[in-house]
Amino acid sequence: MGKFDTYPFAYIRKSIVPIEQAQIPIATNALHYGAGIFGGIKAYETDAGVQIFRLADHMERMRQSCKILRFPYDFNIESTQKIILKLAAKNNLKGTTYIRPLVYRSDTNLSPGIEGDYDLSVYMIQMPEYFQAEKGLSVCVSSWQRNADGALPPRTKATGGYLNSSLAIHDAVTSGFDSAILLDSDGNVGEGAVMNLFMVKNGQLITPASDSDILEGITRRTVQLIAKDIGIPVIERTISRTELYTADEIFFCGTAVEISWCQSVDNVEISSKKGDITTKIHKAFDGLSLSHPELFTKI
Ligand code: PMP
């Protein structure tokens, strides 16, 4: 992801301020120990104006992340949602926007413990597209393993956990790939570095289950909903690394990457063009504000 334009207002320490004033002290605990959890949410231009996609689901995942990591922060879904909507209105969102709420350990004690003060911050950037939409991705299987559930639970969006994604992306990109797939602690397919993975085989969609060291993606859930709508069966099961090479189609999904098709894995060609099922899912994804208006929140 490159550098995108930031909206002028942010939320920090319980107030909306100009983005330049949304600063933290050098000794902020979260900066040193990765004590934070975040959300990555998109707002889209729709026929009914700019709307936020699956806001309540993102709030619930943030609440769960705080709970799993034992943060002494009472994540309130309703009030956080209100803050995001208020900030979105203040920023007068235009076009596709990425919203980044963060709960972080804000005290300046130099100790890695969980106890401490926590704060919520939110800022917003314009995000026209993450990968070049029509180009198929060339990805590799990373030599880095996905964070294991018993080490740094991947079902949380813990800030510190993203060093795992960063290592995988760095090594993939410096070797000439667009991104990477990480294997889980059993050596089976987990997910993409910052995205979930679906494989198409014999007309079925297959994706690793929630016990495969994955973040349970909200876009993944959305793909399952779309597949049900259009009558494509979805199976959650273990995928071995080499089974990827036998797939008819592979695509990634995530809030930032949306639906991004994969042309090759480890330089083994999967498909030379975007496959039929990927195309159907992608089209339906783009039409969600009409087919599933209940998933959108007006600003
Ligand atoms: N896995 C990881 C590691 C991610 O960072 C993301 C992006 N949030 C996803 C999967 C996709 O999740 P979602 O669809 O909820 O954005």
Image: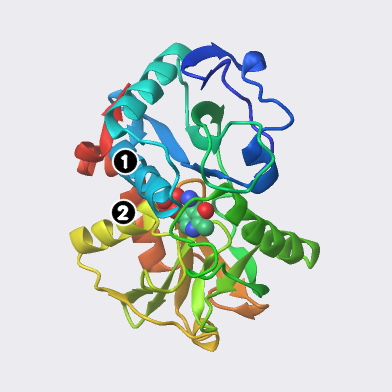
Q: Residues within 10 Å of mark 1 (few under 14, many from 20)?
A: some
Q: Identify the residue position indicated by label 2 in the image.
A: 222
The location of residue 81, given as percent across then percent down, is 33, 28
Viewer-proximal residue among 43 and 213: 213
Residue 71 seen from this side: yes
Question: Which label was assigned to residue 26?
Answer: none
Callout 1 amino acid:
Arg
Query: CB at mark 2 closer than 8 A to ligand 1?
Result: yes
Viewer-proximal residue among 85 and 33: 33
The location of residue 88, given as percent across then percent down, is 42, 20
Callout 2 amino acid:
Thr
Q: Identify the residue position indicated by label 1 in the image.
A: 54
> In the image, what residue occupies the spot 38% across and 53% down?
219
Q: In this view, does 36 lie to the left or right of 20?
A: left
> Measured along the vertical axis of the image, is residue 223 above or below residue 144?
above
Q: Quadrant of the C terminus?
A: top left
Q: CB of mark 2 within 8 Å of CB of mark 1?
A: yes
Viewer-proximal residue among 119 and 167: 119
Q: How crowded is mark 2: few (under 14 residues within 10 Å), some or many (20 or more)?
A: some
Task: Assign a secondary structure to mark 1.
Answer: loop
Q: Is residue 124 left or right of residue 203?
A: right
The location of residue 193, given as percent across then percent down, is 58, 61
The location of residue 240, given as percent across then percent down, is 49, 86
Q: How many numbered badges does the structure rendering display?
A: 2
> In the image, what residue occupies the spot 46% across and 81% down?
247
Return the residue found at the far right: 174
Q: Quadrant of the N terminus?
A: top right
Precedes in sequence: disc 2 or disc 1: 1
Task: Assign a secondary structure to mark 2.
Answer: helix
Q: In this view, does 283 lie to the left or right of 251?
A: left
Query: CB at mark 1 closer than 8 A to ligand 1?
Result: no
Q: Distance between the residues labelled 2 and 1?
A: 9 Å
